[in-house]
Every structure is written in structure tokens, then in C-alpha cells.
Amino acid sequence: MLLKIKHGINNTLIHDKLKNQLRQLDKQLTLLQLDKKSVCVVGSFVLALKNIRQNRDLDLVISPRFKKRISKKKKAFYITKKIEVVGNNWASTIGVSDESIVNDSRFYNVINGFKVVKPEILFLVLLFRGRKKNIPDVENLEKYALCTKQWDWGLIRNVIPKSKTHDFRVRSPRRSIKISKDQTLEYENITLGKLSSTKWSWIMLWPPAKPWFDKISKELSKHSTKKWEKSISLGKSLPDFVRKIYSSDDIQKWKLELKINAMEDYEPIVRIIALEFPSDTFRIKKDVTVYQSKTSVYLKNLIRKKYGKKIPDYFYDIIMHMGDNHKHNHKIFKNLREGNYVK
């Protein structure tokens, strides 16, 4: 049964139930001659603790050197009907060992004297396992993350496997479709006041790339015709600006918040550039059924590859953003005009 994040069923009742589960765990650890410090509670207990959904049992990671005392099993096993010891390498999909889950304080909170894995770590583990049965929990953890100030996006960014961040999606890819003429023409001929049509591609150079704004601008000009350019200082409005610019895209919200978190250590200055491609061809994106400018793909890959390595602790996509197609360009321009960034 899923619980509402803000107004779930009686919190006191749930809290008492969880406290009782921890008392039962305490008794069992005493019987097994294991110290509380040698274990970490993981799994659905964390969801129940955050009032996301109820848990049926309690999952446990035991420090490998202590786990050997009670079993040599590599797979999960129960020590009571309601307490399960998870299989070895519970967080291997994010490159974190069982020993670290139990002993690295970055990864757990202490609740009633027990180590309980942080919801951020549970989110990543379930996310990168990629199992369909975990999708509801992943999506509900994402909702929780977006409505609480307690979520640590910095921890997510530091732990997440960087090589997988861009490619992973919670949902399975949709079926591919062919590009129709109507798709590319629907927005192509819409005029945007004095600033030409949606044949213009709107590019945002993000704060981490500020030292190279001029160089990147010149690089882009080699491949297209520059129509408009301006740098803007956003101050505290940077997060909302980034969210509006990406509102035309299909990016998952947790990825967007990671980008924003990675940008907040930099001076909040953005360079806006409008380019026009005399001719362009399109492709269907692999993970969603939308068409994408091949020129846009080429330029984004070129700039990110060249300048990403110049940024310390680079996180994917924090250098530039560019609309995929005419529809995206139209919406980006609309947001820029509504914010009085272009006239």
C-alpha cells in the first residue's frame, strides 16, 4: 500500500511499528552475538521511515567479516520470518561495498541506535538495478526528493556512477517511429517577432563554462551562422531559470536537480546564443519518440568532450544546453521572452 508523502496514514502508528521492528532486530542480533555497529538496515524500511510506503519485513546488510560468523551464503537468507540478510554486494551497481554501507557515515543515518541507509543511497541502488519491480519505489523516492529540503543532491552527485548517468532511464524505451514531414514542418515556419523563426537554435552556456564562453562561441560560429548573443547574471534565480529552459526537454527531474546542484558552486552567469543552420537533418532519439537535429547532437558532443575535461568534478551536461528540434527552440524562446531575457 503506497502512502502519501505529506499526509499518509497515522504517522505515530507507523513509527511505533518501525520501532518494534528495530526492537526485534536488537533481540536477534543479541542471539547472534552481533553488535549494532556491524549492521545497516536497508530496503523498504527506509521507505516506511519516510512515510512513502509500508514495509513487510526488514532487510539487513552485515559487515562481511561479521557475516561470516553466521553464514557463508552469498545470496539473501532470512534469520527470522521478518528479518532478511541481503545478498553480498548490495550496492555494487553504484560501486559501494557492503563494508562501506555499514561503516562509512556518508551512507547511513542513525535511527534509535541503528544504522539505516540514507534514502539517497537506496534511490541510487534501486535506480541502477533497473528492475521493473523497483520502478514504483524509485518514482516515489524521486517525488519525496523533490518535495523535501532534507534530500542531499550533493551526495547523489558524488556517489552516482558518472558513466551511466546520462544513459539510464527508469522506464523502458518507447518504440521507434519514422520521421514525418509534418513533424519537422509543424514548428519550422512559426515566426517569433523580430527574432526570425524556429530555425534559430537557442543555446545556453552554463556557469561552469564561463571561463570559455568566448572560445565556445567562436567554436560554434564555425559550424553555423550566429544571430544573437548575450550574457546574463541570474543570481538566486539560476535554479528556476535552468528548470524553465529544460521544461521543453524530456529529462528526468532527478537528473535536472543534479545539474542544478553541480552549477551552484559557480558564478550564476549564463551565455545565451542563437544560431541558424542553413540546412539540417534529423534523427529519432533512441529513448523517446521525438526528432532531433543531427547538427545539435554533433555540436553538443563536440563542446562537452572538449571542455568537460577542463572542469573539476565535471558532471554531465553542465556546460551547455541546446534544443533538439523546432518545437524545443520555440518553447525555449518563449521562456526567454517571458523572462525579458530577449526582446
Image (cartoon, rainbow, N blue to C red):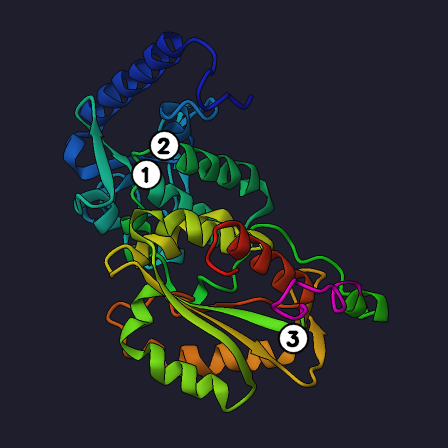
Indicate the amino acid at tag 2: Thr
Label ID, residue 69? none
Left-right relation of 192 to 161: right
* Measured Cα–Cα span from mark 1 to mark 3: 35 Å
Seen at 61% across and 64% down, the residue is 329
On whether residue 14 falls in the magenta region, the answer is no
| Residue receiving disc 3 | 293
User: Dividing the picture into quarters, in which one does residue 25 lie?
Assistant: top left
Callout 1: SS: loop
Does residue 249 appear in the picture of this structure?
no
Callout 3: SS: strand
Indicate the amino acid at tag 1: Trp
Circles 2 and 3, Cβ within 8 Å, touching? The answer is no
Q: Which residues are magenta?
A: 186-198
Seen at 44% across and 61% down, the residue is 165
Q: Residues within 10 Å of mark 2 (few under 14, many from 20)?
A: few
Q: Position of residue 309 (x, y in %)?
A: 31, 79
In the rendered image, the quadrant that contains the N terminus is top right
Does residue 321 appear in the picture of this structure?
yes
Circles 1 and 2, Cβ within 8 Å, touching? The answer is yes
Callout 2: SS: loop
Q: How many marks?
A: 3
Q: Position of residue 72 (x, y in %)?
A: 31, 47
User: Dividing the picture into quarters, in which one does residue 61 lie?
Assistant: top left
| Residue receiving disc 2 | 148
| Residue receiving disc 1 | 151
Q: Residues within 10 Å of mark 1 (few under 14, many from 20)?
A: some
Indicate the amino acid at tag 3: Ser
- As drawn, 328 above or below 19: below
Q: Main secondary structure of the magenta part?
A: loop
